[in-house]
Amino acid sequence: MSTPNFRKILVANRGEIALRVFQTCAEQGIKTVAVYSEADRDSLHVAFADEAVCLGGATASESYLNVERIIAAAKETGAEAIHPGYGFLSERAVFVEACQAAGIVFIGPPAEAMNVMGDKVRSRKAMAAAGVPVVPGVNDLSSAQEAMVAAREIGFPVMLKASAGGGGKGMRIVHQEDELVRAYQAASREAEKSFGDGRLLMERAVMSARHVEIQLMADNHGEVVYVGDRDCSVQRRHQKVIEEAPSPSPQMTPEVRAAMGEVAVRAAKAVNYSGAGTVEFLFEETSSGPRFYFLEMNTRLQVEHPVTEATCGRDLVLDQIRVAAGEPLGYSQADVILHGHSIECRIYAEDPIRFLPSPGTVHTARWPVGGNIRVDTAVASGSVVSSHYDPMVAKLSVWAPDRATAIGRMREALKETVLLGISTNIAFHLRVLAEPDFVSGHFSTRYIDEHPDLLQTSELGETEAKAIAAAAAFDAAMAPGAEAGGVSHGVIPSPWRQSLRWRR
């Protein structure tokens, strides 16, 4: 497989995803450019790029959303291409168009595909026309009165969604008529504030379903393949917390997986897609078998891509770069062979009970190392978790030959993770991984709501005590004069060197 012909790539993002892209670039001999805000001046992603350019103030609007400044940084440094990571500008067609106007390659899909899939109404219409199953619903609601008429036709409960954007913003479940007007007004206001677009659509609320997604990779020569599925059903406030590949649903047979993959490929071809993308589905388990419905398509690399890389053995970032450079994908559907099971836990700096951000300085950070453990992070001892950005501090992933072994391996990795100075959700993850419904694989997107015991405060003190003890043991082992072999996994190198790789 050839090396992409880019000499220098700018990553228009921050934190662990910037480091993730730098890793692949370094392996391919491609120089890298970091961009950063004033708040991120001392961040790890700045330190590990070949060059770095300050974009401006601490807020995202002053920095990571500043299209003009990012384009200028690429020109100043001679970067031929820009990788957007995820979040920020990664799904903004205007950014794609700005790159094209400046003669810079955007490592991602075409602007038109992004425009269609980034608008829930347009994407629903396009998918229905392509024969992709969609949840029954009504598009383009313009008033609460229209919403009431639509809800009576569809039948309660219904789901209101913002036509633009995602991440759970502008989303409301309405169970009965007297809740609808207030919910419509609140969802529209939130959508307007978050995306500058208050339009809503309505769908039948599928109250018990999994969130299953299909990872795609497509080139500019007509090749589109699916590289496995992921189950992202463990969510809070419509935000994913734990992801795994493949889905543990007892109804996810090889035949069903292939059918979903073929539908996802059809969805991508309907909008002339290229690059990495993910088609998300509601996966409803019924007594007569599964039903799946198109939710949306994420036109970027997903946060949870490590579990797919673990099970398919491919570097998805390298594939993105090669496709953007005009190369053929180089493999077909028959070449995609999946192995084992992988789980990812998103570690957040947050109140573990109320799920509220808990920014601050990380006094001590120790990450687990060893076979089949991967840590994607830009946090080390002394790092500051800023209140200006998403509070996720790491993605901890494991791989194993089977799901039961992967769960056990993840529990051990979490117990070895030490983050002092901030509150985290590590104890919450440990509870989930020991909970019988999760262990058996029987859960839906309502999992957290249906298991309020997961949010108890017990064991939090015990978990913190263990973390402090682990940190102390590590520091003692690393002190001058300590005997060799004092740490079971050996010396923990920097996050840049020890993370992002699978050790099999």
Image (tube, rainbow, N blue to C red):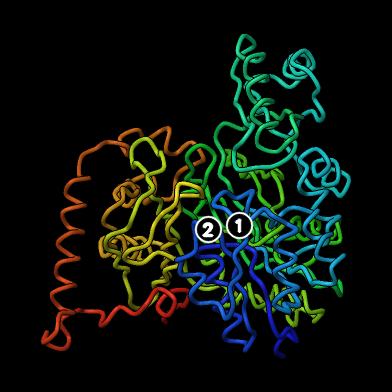
Residue 246 position within the rendered picture, expressed as x and y whole percent measured from the top left: 53, 61
* CB under 8 Å between discs 2 and 1: yes
Q: Which residue is drawn at 73% across and 57% down?
A: 67
For the residue pair 486 and 174, the one nearer the viewer reads as 486
Residue 92 position within the rendered picture, expressed as x and y whole percent measured from the top left: 75, 52
For residue 56, the mark is 1
Q: SS at mark 2?
A: helix
Looking at the image, tell me whether mark 2 or mark 1 is earlier in sequence order: 2
Residue 295 position within the rendered picture, expressed as x and y whole percent measured from the top left: 69, 43
Callout 1 amino acid: Gly
Residue 356 position within the rendered picture, expressed as x and y whole percent measured from the top left: 41, 38
One can see residue 434 in this view:
no
- Left or right: residue 485 compared with residue 81: left
Q: Which residue is drawn at 57% across and 86% down?
A: 27
Q: Which residue is drawn at 60% across and 41% down?
A: 284
Is residue 211 depicted above or below 395 in this figure? above
Instruction: Please tell me how many numbered marks the rendered image carries.
Output: 2
Spatial CA distance of label 2 from label 1 is 6 Å
Label 2, on which residue?
A: 38
For the residue pair 107 and 415, the one nearer the viewer reads as 107
- Left or right: residue 450 compared with residue 465: right
For residue 450, the mark is none
Is residue 143 depicted above or below 395 in this figure? above
Q: SS at mark 1?
A: strand
Q: Quadrant of the N terminus?
A: bottom right
Q: Quadrant of the C terminus?
A: bottom left
For the residue pair 501 and 469, the one nearer the viewer reads as 469
Q: Residue at x 47, y 77 (%)?
A: 501
Within-10-Å neighbours for mark 1: few <14, some 14–19, many 20+ = some
One can see residue 299 in this view:
yes
Callout 2 amino acid: Glu
